[in-house]
């Protein structure tokens, strides 16, 4: 046990100091930080003044035009960022209007004809580039629609009634079951949006961590074997202590990397310009299912050890680092399948494929994570999946131990399955 602890400590300290670990972790943190701050960066490059200037248009109409006054009154009630301002001019040739357009103070202007008994006359929008911003278009459409309704209604309706008449109609949705009856909110129990975000983030992080640390273990074992250092190491510690020491040591590396990434997310969310990012995307951390994080950690740990032991066994039978990529290719492909099944099923976590995959040891860590986060899964199903995964770890751990103990001393070309089986029979675990 003391020797294994020494190996764990040596592996952890040695890998933490490597440039590959530092650079990879730094790149991940930078990419994550840039991604979370993209909206703010866009505002910075566009200019804060432009982003907060609001809507500023002008109306060219005869003096006392009621439609122009109604649009101006509507603008005073706009509560969006920057608000809305409507200037009034009697002629498109007004020098003040041209100056405002040239200096970019106006988004453009609309021209109204003479008042009509049938509501608004034809309206034309003019701008320096001939285009209309989406925000300006929405403002003008709503404002002119309300003005048109008020012109037609005259004094028969109050401004409040006009506003209510033009307010968008709210449509609610209800789910129905196969027998045609409505499903209640309690029965539907749809997972909140925050769970989808957390599940997606955990899928990405767990897959990358397991694959990176698995390849790290295989490369570590193969490099020691190819440089003949392994022959010296086995005289001071048993092959089993070496294997489990490396697996646990690099597991701590993976946990450290996940902690750094989680810390980077927390720091970015605490930045002043990101204070409202959760609100803007309708995300409420209070709705987060805490069980998702607990089960996610358990599934990550079990999934890691399953793949790590297999990577260690494969690395032990490869004598040259040049052959390692080809040797681990099947496990890499299996890892991609494990990742893509829940990734492409995140919108519907209760498909037969996901349910079956949640009981297969190699695919269950991520598939069961998906079902727990955004699917419908019973507690006994989680226990069965975890039990199968745990038993598989013991089985593959026993098998990996036998392969590792014999493989580290087999040099030359990669041994065949028959040769490995013959060598394994000589050792008992």
Image (cartoon, grey):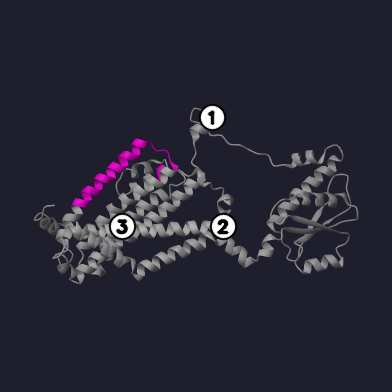
Task: Decide if residue 130 is on the left or right side of residue 114.
Answer: left
- Identified at 69% across, 64% down, the residue is 49
Q: Are marks 2 and 1 in contact (CB under 8 Å)?
A: no
Q: Which mark is residue 274?
A: 2
Q: Residue at x 56, y 57 (%)?
A: 274
Residue 97 lies in quadrant: bottom right
**Disc 1 versus disc 3: distance between alpha carbons?**
49 Å
Viewer-closest of 45 and 125: 45
- Residue 251's tag is 3
Residue in view at x 53 percent, y 57 percent? 270
Of callouts 3 and 2, the N-terminal one: 3
> How far separated are the C-alphas under marks 3 and 2?
32 Å
Of residue 59 and residue 42, the one placed in the foreground of this image is 42
**Residue interval drawn in magenta:** 369-398
Of residue 156 and residue 85, the one placed in the foreground of this image is: 85
Residue 212 locus on image (x, y percent): 34, 61
Q: Where 269 sits versus 190, above or below?
A: below
The quadrant of the image that shows the N terminus is bottom left
């Amino acid at each position: 046990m003391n020797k294994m602890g020494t190996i764990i400590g040596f592996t952890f300290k040695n890998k933490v100091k490597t440039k590959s670990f530092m650079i990879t972790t730094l790149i991940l943190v930078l990419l994550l930080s840039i991604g979370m701050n993209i909206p703010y960066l866009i505002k910075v490059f566009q200019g804060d003044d432009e982003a907060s200037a609001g809507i500023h248009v002008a109306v060219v109409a005869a003096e006392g035009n009621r439609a122009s006054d109604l649009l101006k009154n509507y603008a005073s009630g706009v509560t969006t960022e920057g608000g809305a301002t409507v200037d009034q001019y009697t002629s498109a040739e007004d020098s003040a209007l041209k100056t405002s357009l040239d200096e970019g103070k106006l988004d453009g202007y609309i021209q109204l004809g003479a008042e009509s008994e049938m509501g608004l006359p034809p309206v034309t929008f003019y701008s320096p580039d001939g285009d209309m911003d989406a925000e300006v278009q929405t403002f003008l459409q709503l404002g002119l629609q309300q003005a048109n309704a008020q012109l037609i209604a005259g004094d028969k309706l109050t401004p409040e009634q006009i506003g209510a008449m033009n307010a968008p109609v709210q449509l609610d949705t209800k789910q129905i079951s196969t027998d045609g009856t409505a499903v209640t909110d309690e029965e539907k129990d749809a997972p909140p949006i925050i769970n989808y975000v957390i599940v997606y983030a955990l899928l990405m992080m767990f897959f990358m961590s397991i694959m990176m640390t698995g390849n790290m273990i295989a490369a570590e074992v193969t490099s020691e074997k190819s440089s003949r250092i392994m022959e010296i190491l086995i005289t001071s510690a048993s092959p089993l202590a070496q294997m489990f020491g490396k697996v646990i040591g690099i597991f701590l590396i993976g946990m450290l990397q996940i902690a750094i990434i989680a810390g980077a997310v927390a720091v970015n969310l605490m930045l002043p310009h990101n204070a409202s990012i959760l609100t803007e995307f309708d995300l409420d951390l209070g709705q987060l299912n805490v069980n998702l994080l607990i089960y996610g950690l358990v599934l990550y740990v079990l999934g890691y050890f399953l793949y790590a032991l297999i990577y260690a066994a494969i690395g032990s039978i490869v004598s040259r680092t040049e052959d390692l990529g080809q040797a681990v290719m099947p496990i890499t492909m299996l890892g991609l399948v494990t990742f893509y099944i829940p990734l492409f099923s995140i919108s519907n976590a209760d498909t037969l494929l996901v349910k079956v995959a949640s009981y297969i040891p190699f695919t269950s860590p991520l598939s069961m994570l998906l079902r727990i986060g955004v699917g419908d899964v019973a507690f006994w199903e989680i226990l069965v999946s975890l039990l199968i995964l745990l038993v598989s770890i013991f089985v593959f751990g026993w098998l990996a131990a036998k392969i590792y103990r014999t493989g580290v001393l087999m040099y030359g070309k990669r041994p065949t399955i028959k040769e490995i089986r013959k060598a394994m029979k000589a050792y008992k675990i």
